[in-house]
Image (cartoon, helix red, strand yellow):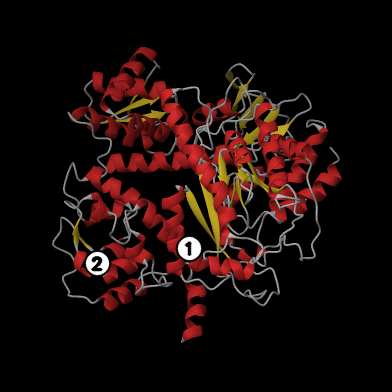
Amino acid sequence: MKNLIYDGTFDGFLTAVFCVFEQGLSSATLQNEFAQQPGLFSDNETIYTDETKANRVWKGLKLKLSPQGSYQLYAAFLSEQEGVEALLLDYIQYTFSQNKRVDKDYSHPSILKIAQIAKSVGREKHRMEAFVRFRLTKDQLYFATIEPDFNVLPLIEKHFKRRYADQKWVIYDLKRKYGLFYNLDRVEVITMDLPENFIATNTDDSFFAAEEFEFQKLWQDYFKATNIASRKNMKLHLRHVPKRYWKYLSEKQPN
Amino acid sequence: MSFQRIQEKLKILADAAKYDVSCSSSGSKRANTNKGLGDATGMGICHSYTEDGRCVSLLKILLTNHCIFDCAYCVTRKSNDVKRAAFKVQEVVDLTINFYRRNYIEGLFLSSGIFKSADYTMERLVAVAKKLRKEENFNGYIHLKSIPGASDELMREAGLYADRLSVNIEIPTEAGLKKLAPDKNRADFIKPMVKVKNEIIQYKAEKKIIKSTPKFAPAGQSTQMIIGASGENDFQIMQTSNYFYNNYQLKRVYYSGYVPISYDERLPQIGSAVPMLRENRLYQTDWLMRFYGFDVSEILNEQHQNLDLDVDPKLSWALRNLHEFPVDVNSADQRMLARIPGLGMKSVYKIINARRYRRLNWEHLKKIGVALNRARYFMVCDSNLFEKRDLTPEKIKGLILQNSTSKYQNTLSNQLSLFG
């Protein structure tokens, strides 16, 4: 069995898929080079990302899938879950092997599984759109850090660009060490050298604008005042706002 | 703006606004224009949740809690001894913009106590919305309260700036209203509602001909009823709800379990439990009416005036109508699929899509996410294993309750022991 190693990008992955079809491999595994476990497989081949090949696969898939189907495929890829490549490959092979559209065939195991993974990624995307908390820096930049379970930055870019068209902002993924910067014109991918002792939620007045702390305080007060104590339901609360997100939410910080 | 002063006002006026349950921020389709701030095209977003599990999507505040009315159920009533405060128009604008820029909220929900007169109050609400739209180029979501008795001219202006307008009828029956809010009458609530409804229809019609016609309250109207304050049964409540959906084309009717806030003897006393389970069952019924193709009279009628607390209203309907079952999931139409207990509309669509490829069996259904512990008594699929016993409704209900745990277990056992 052949093991194709790609560079972790979506184009890289699609290039690898192209090779599977080109070489007529009946069984192959695709592996992200960062997740590679050397020596486990004997027949390794490194795939060099080729945009033309990637685009051919993607174009072909778009013809065979509904818009929702191709979105699910991409979202599932961004999940970075272990073994997702195998599922995606099976999904793609099944898609190309059938004449009719199959992306709604939920009784097919890979299709259902990809739909489910895409749903979790979608949930995470939606959560990030909700839980990002911008803080205004001294140089009038709205700055937020996140650590999402899945790599959702590419999915949330459009939302924030459309919404905050008249303010500069940065959303930085601390886990994956890259971020998006909107400069009032377009969104750029950036990497930052954050200071060694940088704590994302710390309210550091050498970095943030003075009025920032007032608005955080007002928001905390609002959050408290709008609660109805006699209806308290912590179980429901935790289901909506799992504890792992708390550290980024201004309203959840101790005073 | 002075931070301390604003902080104090915000505490008072957010606290007074929290009994309005609507926090919806969807359905508006207001896009960002000219690189302004905000966008309300997508689905609504809950930016946080309070400890009672309710969504925080909008900055929900009163402009003021000074009020000339004395409605027994209301915390802001004239005779109540509470701290009073009032925001200036600009203060609300600044708060909204600054919260929005930090991604705390989807927009503003502005309500108010009634000071001086209905029009005087409504004018100020409209001024806030106008300022946000015209001066701040704000395209986020704005929900304004329609003040009962406000003039047609003001309501028309409100609709041009707001995404949603709402007026709470609060008490489901006119008799109840007379008892608890003698200085209010239902006609005053209805007046702005009718005006907004007519304008929405007119603007929509014009938009079809002239594309540049501005939006008018694109997210529609809603209302709210208090549950458990004035002795109505579920049949009366849902009848009223159905009436408002049909006659005023409301987007939503909200049901708010009464939170005791007064020692008034006309009302449940402080310390009595909020009827949360009942509220939940009413919402389920509302959903069955709006999305599952049920007519309200199938669920609540002269014979069944109250919803069961121990099972959901769809299961309860199914148990009364066993002759409609079992349904074959591989051939039934959408209407009948939607009536199977344990099947939500998402599962219904998944089944309809999936069965085009192959006949579905229990394994498929389970993976799709059907709640089989309820559904299996009401359906057959591509399998010989189905419920062959001739079970009575009581027996089925018993089996289902035995094999499931309700999140309301505690509430239920308390409430049942009252009658036991």
Which residue was labeled with disc 1?
Answer: B280
Residue B70, position in %: x, y?
71, 64
Q: Quadrant of residue B186?
A: bottom right
Disc 1 chain ID: B
Front of the two marks 2 and 1: 1
Judging from the image, what secondary structure is the residue with disc 1 in?
A: helix
Vertical side of B318 occupied by B199: above or below: above
Residue B328, position in %: x, y?
18, 57
Which residue was labeled with disc 2?
Answer: B377
Residue B159, position in %: x, y?
57, 37
Residue farthest to the left, as pictured? B384
Q: Name the residue located 35 percent from the left edge and 20 percent from the top edge.
A: A15
Under mark 1, the amino acid is Asn
Disc 2 chain ID: B
Q: Quadrant of residue A210?
A: top right
Q: Tell me whether circle 2 and circle 1 mark residues in contact (CB < 8 Å).
A: no
Q: Name the residue located 42 percent from the left edge and 33 percent from the top edge.
A: A75
In the shown orientation, is residue B399 left or right of residue B310?
Answer: left
Vertical side of A43 occupied by B115: above or below: below
Residue in the foreground of this view, choosing between B380 and B123: B123
In the shown orientation, is residue B356 left or right of residue A234?
Answer: left
